[in-house]
Image: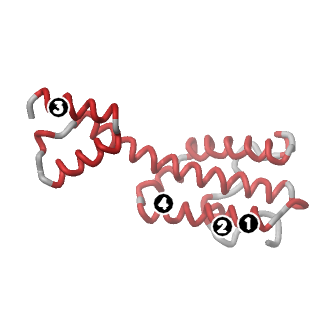
Amino acid sequence: MNSIELKMLQTLYEQDFCAWVEQTAQLLRSHQWDTLDLEHLIEEVVDLGKSQQRALQSALRLVLSHLLKWKYQPERRSHSWQVTITRERLNLDELLQESPSLRRFLNDAEWINTTYQRARREAMVETGLSEENFAIVCPFSIDEILDLDFYPNAEK
């Protein structure tokens, strides 16, 4: 690829991402390795991995915040909370099935703590309860978080 063609592809990336993706896919399918915009392609591949991690963290945060609400506000338990917990547990399961390497984050105490602290803050805001009401450290094990039948302190 000459520098003019590369510059055109790089400009396309900046001006019309979808068109850049289509062009890049076409170049990959036709094995035109020397015509690829490698700099942006590498950036996008890295971002795909980050996107999977964010999806995992988002689903985990939602499960945790709802489990906290379930645990600390039993009088407000609702079918809606149960639906959210189940849906996000299924999302977690799906993500882990599709990308088993994501499981390493569930074994990373610092990553879990960061996610838990966000969920804790969210639960505080949603319930109106003060932070003293919520455990400082995640009160649930990973097995409990992922267990479709686990609900803290009570019957469903």
Residue located 45% across and 54% down the image? 102
Label disc, if present, on residue 82 of the rendered structure = 1
* Mark 3 vs mark 2, CA separation in Å: 47 Å
Residue 50: which quarter of the image? Answer: top left
Measure the alpha-carbon separation of dots 4 and 3.
Answer: 35 Å
For badge 2, the amino acid type reads Thr
CB within 8 Å, label 4 to label 1: no
**Sequence order check: which comes first, mark 4 or mark 1?**
1
Q: Is disc 2 in contact with disc 1, using a CB cutoff of under 8 Å?
A: yes
Q: Amino acid at mark 3?
A: Leu
Q: Which residue is mark 3?
A: 6
Mark 2 highlights which residue? 86
- Mark 4 and mark 3 lie on one chain; the one further toward the N terminus is 3
Where is residue 126 drawn, in percent x and y? Answer: 80, 46
Q: Nearer the viewer, residue 58 or 23?
A: 23
**Vertical order, 66 against 39 (above or below):** below
Tell me how far mark 2 sits from mark 4, CA to CA. 14 Å
Q: Secondary structure at mark 2?
A: helix
The quadrant of the rendering that contains the N terminus is top left
Is 125 situated left or right of 6 in this image? right
CA gap between label 4 and label 1 equals 20 Å
What residue did someone put label 4 on? 95
